[in-house]
Amino acid sequence: MGDVYDTIAVYWLPTLIAVLMFGIGTAIGSWLARRAWTRRSFIDRVNVSVNLLDNGVLRLRTLVERPLQDLFFNRSTAEQLARAARRAAYGRSDGPFLALSTSVRSLVHTALLNRLSEYFIAGLLRRAAGLPTTETTYVLALTLEQRAPKTARKIRVVMINQDQLHALPPVTPALEDPAHATRFETLKAMAEIDRVAPERLLRLVVYT
């Protein structure tokens, strides 16, 4: 009988524990996913969108959307950004903008600049080769906007041509979607930040 107990202890017990742990982990993961979907809260994702005023219409176009860890390889930087997003989610932030310390903001901006530059490498190489290019400066801000209830909440990097940011109309322009009214308010706030504290925003020079 002792041999049976020894066999169970050595072979079956660890396997049973592993199966139970896997099951518990899967259940917790599924519960968290359902909870996030119900709340439309996906703070572990980053959406980068280009915003433009096109013939009087505000248009938003996604450039890239990735899990937080895919855009910010440094785990500490990603965790700091996630914490700032959670603070914003509970209203403990500067409006829609993520509140970051100067040191963390520098790390986040550098990482984001490096990742986004990959999408515009063709123009940079043409510039390096001495070929004709057009230079455009974009201004970027990290946000967690309080948008319409059915809109997914995630970290949103708002990206807009610097010249357009400085020439926003005084009233809300035509919108492709009524929910984009929030984005126009964010852009107006960005313009004010760029006027008084431009170091809080990121600039990306693109060659095309």
Image (cartoon, rainbow, N blue to C red):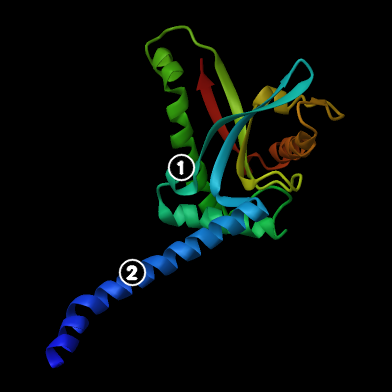
Image: 74 above or below 163: below
- In this picture, residue 65 sits left or right of residue 1: right
Q: Secondary structure at mark 1?
A: helix
Question: In the current view of this chain or complex, which residue is farthest to the front?
Answer: 1
Q: Position of residue 57 (x, y in %)?
A: 77, 21
Q: Is residue 46 left or right of residue 8?
A: right
Q: Quadrant of residue 18?
A: bottom left
Q: Residue at 60% across / 55% down in the picture?
A: 36
Crowdedness near tag 2: few (<14), some (14–19) or many (≥20) residues, C-alpha within 10 Å: few
Label 2 to label 1: alpha-carbon separation = 33 Å
Whole-percent x, y for residue 137 in the image: 59, 24
* Residue ID at (21%, 82%): 8
Q: Looking at the picture, tell me which residue is in the foreground, 204 or 79.
A: 79
Q: Nearer the viewer, residue 16 or 208?
A: 16
Residue for point 61% across, 52% down? 37
Q: Are the residues flagged by discs 2 and 1 in contact, CB closer than 8 Å? A: no
| Image quarter in which the N terminus is found | bottom left
Task: Give the quarter of the image for residue 131.
Answer: top left
Figure check: 80 above or below 190: below
Residue at numbered disc 2: 19
Residue 135 lies, in percent from the top left, at: 55, 17
Q: Which residue is mark 1?
A: 71
Judged from this view, the residue extending furthest toward the top is 132
Q: Amino acid at mark 2?
A: Val
Q: Is residue 1 visible?
A: yes
Comes first in the chain, label 2 or label 1 = 2
How packed mark 1 is, by other alpha carbons closer than 10 Å (few <14, some 14-19, many 20 or more), is some
Would residue 72 be found to the left or right of residue 52 on screen? left
Amino acid carrying mark 1 in the image: Leu
Camera-nearest label, 2 or 1: 2
Q: Is residue 99 visible?
A: no
Q: Say which quarter of the image contains residue 185.
A: top right
